Image (cartoon, rainbow, N blue to C red):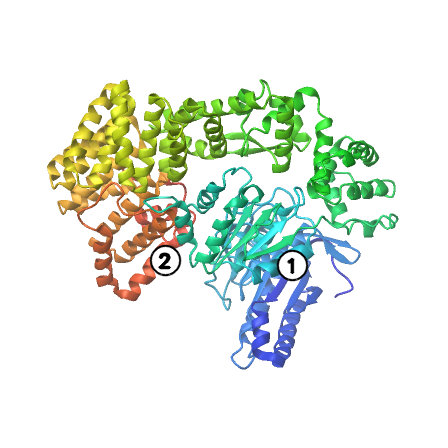
C-alpha cells in the first residue's frame, strides 16, 4: 500500500478477475505466472495516471486517484493492455472494474465511508472485461477533453447492502469489449427482495455457515425464539445467494397466514401463479418449480408446522429447488438441516475501558446504530460504556429487544434505560416456566415499552393486534377508536408500529412478536370478542364497497386494494366461519367472488364457501354460498360440482325470490353448459339471465350475457348472430367503461372475424383486448389474446414476432396454471395451428430460439412487444399496460 493517500474528493477503483477460481483449477501452478503478469499490467496502467494502490488481495486491486478522468483513463488502459497481452495456453484474463467518486476519509490509515463500499459494489456488479462507473463519476468527466470514449446508460440498479438504487454507466470506446449481460445487481436474477429499511449488522459467521449449509442441503431451517433476527438474517443470505440461483430468490412471508392449508396459495401468490383448471394449488406450485434453480424463503413457519409435509413433497418433486425456512421450531422432516440462530455477540464486561474492542461486539454495534437513528449525536463514551454493555447483556443480545431499547435513547440516557430494564426484568423468575428464557426477555422488553404508554395508547396498541398484514388509518379508526392518528404516531415512535406508504396511502405494520404481545393484552382486557367482530364487519363492508367498484373503470384500482387487505379479509372470513356468523361469511363471499376469480384465489374461495355450506345456513345464505362455490368450481374446470351447486342455487333462489343470485347462477350455469356442448341449456340460461340483469340494471352482467350469447352462436357456426350479439355486449361495456366485459366481447368478435378469414378485422379487437386484459392482469384472457394475435402475426409473415408472442403466452400459462379455453372449447386449436405455421417458416431451431426469447418476457413486456414489436432493450423500460396505445374499436 502507498504510504501517502489523498483525501477530500477522490476516485476509487476496484478490480478483480472474473472466474479466478476456475482459472486456478485449470492452470495449477502456472496460474502464478498469469497472476504476476496481471498485476504488472494493472500497476503500470494505474501508476501512469497517478493512481495510488490502497491494497491488493489475491487477484483484486483497490486503487485511488485524485481525479475522475485519471481513474477512467487508467481503467481503459488496463483493459486494453490485458486484451493485447499473450497469457499463453489460450488463456483470457477478464477483469471487471468499478469506479466511483466520493469522499476520501482516512481512519487509522484506511479509507472509510459509504463511498468506498459503493465503489466496491459497483465493481462486483460488473462482468469480466467491463468498466462500470457511477453517475457521479460520469458527470465529472462529461464534456472534458480526452480520447473517444463514451458512456452507455445501464439504468438504475439495486446494489447489495445499499439502501437506494444507483444509476450505472458502462465505459465504451475503441478496444473495449461490449455486449455484456445486465449488471450483476440484486435485480440480475428474478426476485421479490426489497431494499431493507435499515442496514445489516454483523453476523459474518452465521452468513458463512448458512451459505455453506444451503450449498450442501436443499432445506435449511433457521430456528430460535422470536426476536433473534432469523428473518433479517435469511433476507441477507438471500441477497448474497442471488447469483447462485438462475431462476431467482423469492421471500414468502407467512406471519399472517393462519391456516396450514394456505401455505401453497401463499407461495403461489408470491410467485405470481394463478390457479386455473382442475389442478390444485399444490400441484400448480410443484409443476412451476419443477426443474427451476430457485431459492424459496418461507418466513415465520412455526404456526404452520402441519404444512411441513408439503415442503417435503415439494423437495421430492423438484430437483433444483432450495428452501430456507425461519421458524421457532424445526419442521422435523428428513431433508431438513436445522441451524439454530444464536443471539448477537456480546461485549466483554471486563474490558470497559477499551471502547474500540467494545464496538466489535455485534450487540453494541446494533444498539449504537439504532440509537443514532433517533438521536444522531449519540455515541459510545467512557461515561456510558458500562450502561450500554449492561443493556446488551441484560437483553441477551436479542436484536428486537436491542432495537426497542435503543428507541428509548430518544428521551432517556443509557443509565435510565438500565434502571427501567432492571425493574421490568425483576419478575422474570415468576413468569411461565414453559417459555424459553430469551422469549421471556423479549416479552419483557416489549412489556417495558408497553408500560411506558398511557391508557389510551395501551388500549389502541392492544386492539391493533387484531389486524393481519397491516392496517390503514381508516380501518383502525373504525375498529379500534376515533381520532387515532396522533396515538399511532406515538406508537410508531415507540417502535411498536411502523408507518409506511403504499399506493393507497399511509399504512401501519407491526412486527410479528409485537403483534402477538398486543393480542395477549387484548385477550386480557376482555375486549377481544368485540374487537374481532368489529374487524370482521369492517372488512365485510370494505369488500362490499369494493365489489360495487369492480364493475366499471376503477376495477383495477379496487382489485389492488383488496389484494393489499387480503390477509385481513382472510382473517375476517376465518372469524365468521369460526363464530358461525353465516351473514358475514356469505356477504364476504359474494363481495369477493370476482377478486378470487381475477386474481387466482379460486381454491381459497371454494374452501371458504364449502365450510359455510357445512353450517347448513339459512336459505338466503346457502344460496350465496352455492353460487360462489359453483363459480370457483367452474373456473377450476370442475363442471360436475359447478352444475350441481348452480342448479341447487337456482332452485333456492327461485323459491325465495332472490333474482340477483338467480341471474348470476343462470349466467354461470350457461357457461358451464357451453363447456359441455349443451347449447340449448346454455342459450336458455343466458337469455333468462339477460332479462333479469336488465331488470336489475346490472349493465356489466348485461354486457357479459350478450357476449356469452355471441360465443354460443359462434360455437354453433352462426357467425352473423355471433357478431351481432357480441357487438351488443361491446356497446354496453363501452358505455359503462368496464374492462372485464370489454375484453370478453372483444375476444368473441376477434374469433368471429378469424372464422370469416378476415384477420384485418380481427386485429383491432385483439390489440385493444391485449391492452385491457394486461391491465386487469387476468392471465387467462391475456393468453387467449396473445395466442390469437400470434396467429394473425404469423399469417401476416411476421414469424419471429409471432413466435416470441407465443412463447410469452406459454410462460404465462405455466406460471398461472392456465388451461386452454376454460369457457371456450374453440373449434380450432389456435396454438397448434400457429405452431405448425411457425415451424414451417422458421425451422425447428429458429422456432425454439424465438419461443425461448418470448418465455423470458414478463406479461407486461409481452403486451408491449406484441403490439409494437419493440426491441427487448426498449420494452424492459416499458410503462404500465394502460400506457399501451390502442384505438378502441367502436361496436358495429
Near-viewer residue (339 or 857) = 339
Which sits in the foreground, 825 or 586? 586
Residue 557 image-quadrant placement: top left
Let me know if residue 400 appears in the view. yes
Q: Which mark is residue 152?
A: none
Quarter that holds the C terminus: top left
Against 662, residue 605 (above or below) is below
Q: Residue at x 30, y 66 (%)?
A: 845
**Residue 416 place in picture, x, y as percent:** 82, 32
Q: Quadrant of residue 18?
A: bottom right
Q: Name the spot of residue 781 as percent of width and height, x first.
A: 30, 42
Is label 2 or label 1 in front? Answer: 1
Q: Position of residue 858 (x, y in %)?
A: 39, 49
Determine which quarter of the picture holds residue 608.
Answer: top left
Going 62% across and 45% down the picture, which residue do you hit?
A: 328
- Horizontal relation, residue 114 to residue 25: left or right: right
Observer able to see residue 891: no
Q: CA distance from mark 2 to mark 1?
A: 36 Å
SS label for mark 2: helix
Question: What residue is drawn where x is 18% and y is 49%?
Answer: 828
Horizontally, residue 412 falls left or right of residue 335, namely: right
Q: Within 10 angstroms of label 1, few (less than 14), some, or many (20 or more) residues? A: few
Residue at 63% x, 47% y is 230
| Residue at the disc numbered 2 | 853
Quick one: label 2, few (<14), some, or many (20+) residues within 10 Å?
some
**Looking at the picture, how far across and down is residue 290, in whole percent?**
42, 57
Residue picked out by circle 1: 208
Of labels 2 and 1, earlier in sequence is 1
Position of the N terminus, as image quadrant, is: bottom right
Amino acid at each position: 500500500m502507498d504510504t501517502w493517500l489523498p483525501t477530500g474528493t477522490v476516485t476509487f477503483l476496484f478490480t478483480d478477475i472474473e472466474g479466478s477460481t476456475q482459472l486456478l483449477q485449470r492452470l495449477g501452478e502456472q496460474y502464478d505466472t498469469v497472476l504476476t503478469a496481471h498485476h504488472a499490467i494493472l500497476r503500470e496502467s494505474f501508476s501512469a495516471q497517478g493512481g495510488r494502490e490502497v491494497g491488493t488481495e489475491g487477484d483484486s486491486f483497490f486503487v485511488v486517484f485524485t481525479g475522475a478522468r485519471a481513474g477512467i483513463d487508467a481503467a481503459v488502459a488496463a483493459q486494453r493492455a490485458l486484451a493485447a497481452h499473450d497469457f499463453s495456453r489460450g488463456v483470457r484474463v477478464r477483469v471487471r472494474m468499478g469506479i466511483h467518486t466520493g469522499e476520501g476519509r482516512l481512519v487509522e490509515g484506511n479509507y472509510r465511508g459509504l463511498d468506498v463500499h459503493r465503489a466496491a459494489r459497483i465493481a462486483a456488479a460488473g462482468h469480466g472485461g467491463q468498466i462500470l462507473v457511477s453517475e457521479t463519476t460520469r458527470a465529472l468527466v462529461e464534456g472534458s477533453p480526452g480520447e473517444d470514449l463514451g458512456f452507455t446508460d445501464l439504468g438504475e440498479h439495486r446494489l447489495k447492502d445499499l439502501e437506494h438504487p444507483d444509476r450505472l454507466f458502462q465505459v465504451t470506446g475503441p478496444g473495449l469489449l461490449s455486449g455484456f449481460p445486465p449488471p450483476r445487481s440484486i435485480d440480475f436474477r428474478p426476485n421479490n427482495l426489497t431494499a431493507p429499511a435499515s442496514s445489516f449488522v454483523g453476523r459474518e459467521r452465521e452468513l458463512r455457515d448458512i451459505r455453506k449449509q444451503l450449498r450442501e442441503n436443499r432445506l435449511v431451517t433457521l430456528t430460535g425464539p422470536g426476536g433473534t433476527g432469523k428473518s433479517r438474517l435469511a433476507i441477507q443470505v438471500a441477497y448474497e445467494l442471488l447469483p447462485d440461483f438462475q431462476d431467482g430468490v423469492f421471500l414468502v412471508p407467512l406471519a399472517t397466514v393462519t391456516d396450514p392449508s394456505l401455505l401453497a396459495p401463499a407461495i403461489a401468490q408470491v410467485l405470481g401463479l394463478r390457479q386455473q383448471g382442475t389442478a390444485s394449488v399444490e400441484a400448480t406450485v410443484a409443476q412451476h418449480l419443477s426443474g427451476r434453480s430457485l431459492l424459496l424463503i418461507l418466513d415465520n413457519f412455526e404456526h404452520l408446522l402441519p404444512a411441513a409435509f408439503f415442503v417435503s413433497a415439494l423437495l421430492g418433486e423438484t430437483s433444483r429447488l432450495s428452501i430456507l425456512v425461519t421458524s421457532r421450531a424445526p419442521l422435523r422432516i428428513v431433508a431438513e438441516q436445522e441451524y439454530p440462530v444464536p443471539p448477537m455477540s456480546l461485549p466483554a464486561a471486563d474490558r470497559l475501558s477499551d471502547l474500540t474492542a467494545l464496538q466489535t461486539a455485534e450487540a453494541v454495534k446494533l444498539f449504537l446504530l439504532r440509537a443514532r437513528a433517533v438521536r444522531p449525536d449519540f455515541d459510545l463514551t467512557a461515561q456510558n460504556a458500562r450502561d450500554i454493555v449492561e443493556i446488551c447483556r441484560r437483553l441477551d443480545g436479542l436484536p428486537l429487544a436491542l432495537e426497542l431499547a435503543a428507541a428509548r435513547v430518544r428521551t432517556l440516557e443509557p443509565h435510565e434505560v438500565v434502571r427501567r430494564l432492571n425493574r421490568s426484568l425483576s419478575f422474570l423468575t415468576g413468569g411461565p416456566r414453559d417459555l424459553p428464557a430469551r422469549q421471556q426477555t423479549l416479552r419483557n422488553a416489549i412489556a417495558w415499552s408497553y408500560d411506558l404508554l398511557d391508557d389510551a395508547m395501551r388500549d389502541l396498541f392492544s386492539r391493533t393486534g387484531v389486524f393481519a398484514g397491516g392496517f390503514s388509518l381508516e380501518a383502525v379508526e373504525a375498529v379500534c377508536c376515533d381520532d387515532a392518528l396522533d396515538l399511532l404516531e406515538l406508537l410508531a415512535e415507540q417502535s411498536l408500529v411502523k408507518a409506511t406508504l403504499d399506493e393507497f396511502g399511509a399504512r401501519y405494520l407491526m412486527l410479528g412478536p409485537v403483534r402477538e404481545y398486543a393480542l395477549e393484552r387484548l385477550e386480557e382486557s376482555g375486549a377481544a370478542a368485540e374487537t374481532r367482530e368489529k374487524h370482521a364487519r369492517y372488512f365485510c363492508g370494505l369488500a362490499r364497497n369494493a365489489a360495487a367498484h369492480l364493475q366499471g373503470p376503477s376495477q383495477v384500482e379496487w382489485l389492488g386494494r383488496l389484494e393489499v387487505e387480503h390477509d385481513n379479509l382472510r382473517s375476517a372470513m376465518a372469524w365468521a366461519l369460526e363464530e358461525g356468523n353465516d351473514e358475514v361469511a356469505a356477504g364476504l363471499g359474494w363481495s369477493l367472488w370476482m377478486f378470487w376469480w381475477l386474481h387466482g384465489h379460486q381454491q381459497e374461495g371454494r374452501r371458504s364457501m364449502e365450510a359455510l355450506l357445512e353450517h347448513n345456513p339459512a336459505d338466503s345464505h346457502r344460496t350465496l354460498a352455492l353460487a360462489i362455490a359453483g363459480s370457483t368450481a367452474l373456473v377450476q374446470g370442475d363442471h360436475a360440482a359447478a352444475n350441481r351447486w348452480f342448479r341447487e342455487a337456482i332452485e333456492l333462489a327461485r323459491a325465495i325470490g332472490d333474482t340477483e343470485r338467480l341471474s348470476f347462477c343462470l349466467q354461470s350455469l350457461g357457461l358451464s353448459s357451453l363447456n359441455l356442448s349443451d347449447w340449448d341449456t346454455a342459450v336458455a340460461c343466458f337469455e333468462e339471465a339477460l332479462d333479469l340483469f336488465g331488470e336489475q340494471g346490472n349493465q356489466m352482467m348485461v354486457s357479459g350475457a350478450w357476449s356469452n350469447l355471441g360465443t354460443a352462436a359462434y360455437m354453433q357456426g352462426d357467425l352473423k348472430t355471433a357478431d351481432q350479439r357480441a357487438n351488443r355486449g361491446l356497446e354496453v361495456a363501452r358505455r359503462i367503461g368496464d374492462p372485464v366485459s370489454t375484453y370478453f366481447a372483444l375476444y368473441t368478435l376477434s374469433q368471429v372475424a378469424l372464422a370469416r378469414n378476415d384477420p384485418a378485422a380481427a386485429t383491432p379487437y385483439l390489440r385493444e383486448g391485449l391492452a385491457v386484459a394486461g391491465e386487469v392482469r387476468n392471465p387467462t384472457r391475456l393468453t387467449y389474446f396473445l395466442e390469437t394475435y400470434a396467429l394473425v402475426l404469423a399469417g401476416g409473415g411476421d414469424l419471429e414476432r409471432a413466435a416470441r408472442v407465443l412463447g410469452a403466452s406459454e410462460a404465462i400459462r405455466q406460471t398461472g396454471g392456465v388451461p386452454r379455453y376454460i369457457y371456450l372449447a374453440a373449434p380450432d386449436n389456435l396454438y397448434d395451428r400457429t405452431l405448425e405455421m411457425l415451424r414451417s417458416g422458421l425451422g425447428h431451431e429458429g422456432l425454439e430460439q424465438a419461443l425461448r426469447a418470448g418465455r423470458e418476457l414478463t406479461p407486461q413486456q409481452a403486451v408491449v412487444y406484441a403490439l409494437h414489436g419493440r426491441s427487448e432493450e426498449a420494452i424492459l423500460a416499458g410503462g404500465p399496460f394502460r400506457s399501451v396505445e390502442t384505438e378502441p374499436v367502436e361496436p358495429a
